[in-house]
Structures are given as C-alpha cells and as structure tokens.
Amino acid sequence: QSSSQPLPDLLLNSSKSSTITMKLSLASLALLAASASAFTAVTPAGRASTSLNILAGTQSATERVANVMAARPEENEAIDALVKKNFPGAISNKAMETKIASILEAKGFTPANTLLCTSLCCDELARNLEDDLNKVYGHNFNLGGLSGFPFAGNTGFGAMSAHVPDDGFCLLVHGPHVGISKDGVIGKVERSGIALVDNCCGSAIAASNYLKGITDGGAKITTKLQQFSDFQQGAVQELILPHGKRLNDADNRMKELPYALYDSQDILVRDIINGGKGGIKQGLALLSGIQINTGPDTLDYFHPLRFDYYDSDGNMVGSMLSKL
C-alpha cells in the first residue's frame, strides 16, 4: 500500500488550504486599508471650528462697547455711593469699558487685531466683565484660576502670545474680586436665583480663614500640605501667607483681603510678562485691579490699580492709569 493520500482527499485538502490562504489575504488587505485610513485626515462631522474669534468688521471698539452698554442698567445712585465709599477710586464697568476702548483705539488696538487675555477668578460673577470684553474683542485666552491667580503661568502666556494676530496687540486683564451686598456688607453678594446672600470671593475667604488659623495659633497640624485635587486653593493659601499681619491689623479684613491678594498677583503677572516679553508682537496693555461685584440688577465696578502699556520689545513704556 502507498503511504500517499488518496487523490480525492488530496484535492480536498488543497482546496481548504487555498480557501484559508485567500481568507488570510483578504484579512491582510483589510488590515492594511485600516492602517492607511488611520493616517488619512478626516474632519469629524459637526465639529466646531477652533479658530480664534477675533472680531473683524467695520465697527470700532468704541462702537461695540456702546452697543454692549446699551443693554446694561443705568448706575444706581445708592449702590454707586456705597461702592465708592468703601472702595475709593472704583468706577463702574460701564464707564471703565468705554474709556478703555477709546484709550486703546488711539494706540491702534481694534477688534480685528487684538487678543483678549484674562486672569480672573473661576466664579461666574467674574465673567461679567469678561463677557462684556468678549463682545468687543472676541474670545479670550484664559490664564486664571481661583481668586484670579494666573495658574496657566509662563507656559500659558507663551501660548497666548503665539495666538496674537501678526502685527497685533494683547489686552491682558487680571485681578481678584470681592462682593458687596446692597446692605453694604463686604465679602457678601446677592446672586440670581439664590435666596442666600453668598460669600464672594469664596476662595479668597477660605484662604483668609486658613491664614487666620495660623496667625491666631489655632491651625491644626496636618501631613496633607498639598492635594492635587485642590492644588489651586492650596496655592492661594500659600500666596496669601505674607499678608498675615496686614490682614490682622486691618479695620475691615474683608475689605483689605482683595488688595492683599492683588499685591501677590501683581508680582506674579508682571514676572510672567517679563519672562515672555519676547513673544509680544505690536504691544500689550495690562489692566489690573479689583473687581467689585454687586447684585444681579445693578452694575459691577472695578478699582483699576494698573493700566500699563508694553511696546513690541516688551518694555513697559508708560502708564495710562490717570486716563481712567
């Protein structure tokens, strides 16, 4: 007997082998096609554009501000007097935004060539000023986090500078915020839809309480010096430490608190600008101070403490504060 397979079996096995080979070949082709498609640029359906919303058009910044302010209430005399009594030098956002647009227009800032950059608190009340300026200059680049500290740092500033239009400008606005209720309580404010007159700024007040626990000797010993899940608040608490005596000696701790925070932020922001000044294009305007939030039916205010102009070489060449 021959050890070779019968002819029918041999033909059958040969047919199976060809079928398997063909299936493997088809699978290989499918795999190659899938691999190739991975390197093919595909635009996802319905994806929004990520381009900067620098506002082009014929309207000037002053015209845009006038349109925005037309929807705002008139100054409430009682609230106006209350704010200015407690925060001498404060002006309404309505008045300040109008002046800013006019001053910067004279230097060449337009809605089409200006990138707005902000470092303001996460609180929704801090969006009031930011939203107004968005309607004038377009979407903002956000450097800020809790209490308004510039947590995006040097990396954020470098990225922002690269997004400024060629031969364009940057308007950088920063500062902490504080509430004042209609009854004149500083550190409290009425919020829309909430019966409770709430803390403002909550992060600042928490940091102040942390500091008071240290200066009064009541702080508890803990091994949890920093937590990643709350590292911004931890940083705010560390950055307010140098102001312990100042706050303890203040007649009104809540009134002094935003100014203490501002002094720490001012050092940080100017250091960040200096470190990234090589990325400044035509120029940069730095507006900083204290945001003062009032109730939902009245204007917010701002106490400007710095309004500087940096030239294309990153040198601070003049203050525009007196024009506000």
Image: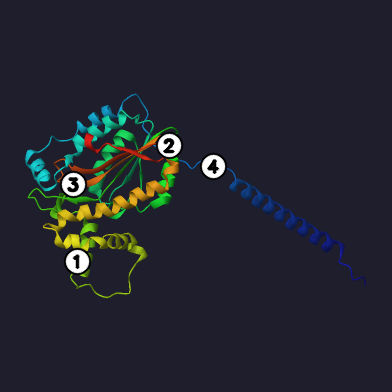
* Nearest to N terminus: mark 4 or mark 3: 4
Which residue is pictured at 71% across the width and 56% down the height?
A: 24
* Nearest to N terminus: mark 1 or mark 3: 1
Relative image position of residue 50 (x, y in whole percent): 43, 40
Which residue is pictured at 44% across the width and 42% down the height?
A: 279
Relative image position of residue 155 (x, y in whole percent): 43, 50
Q: Which residue is mark 4?
A: 42
* Nearest to N terminus: mark 4 or mark 1: 4
The answer to the question of whether label 2 and label 3 lie on touching residues, with beta carbons closer than 8 A, is: no
Task: Please state which amino acid type lies under the numbered disc 2.
Answer: Lys
Q: Which residue is mark 2?
A: 281
Q: Closer to us: mark 1 or mark 3?
A: 1
Q: Which residue is mark 3?
A: 292
* Nearest to N terminus: mark 2 or mark 3: 2
Left or right, 192 with respect to 274, comes to: left
Relative image position of residue 122 (x, y in whole percent): 28, 51
What is the CA distance from the residue labelled 4 to the residue labelled 3?
Answer: 47 Å
Which residue is pictured at 41% across the width and 49% down the height?
A: 275
Q: From the image, which quarter does the C terminus lie in? A: top left
The answer to the question of whether label 4 and label 3 lie on touching residues, with beta carbons closer than 8 A, is: no
Q: From the image, which quarter does the N terminus lie in? A: bottom right
Task: Please state which amino acid type lies under the numbered disc 4.
Answer: Val
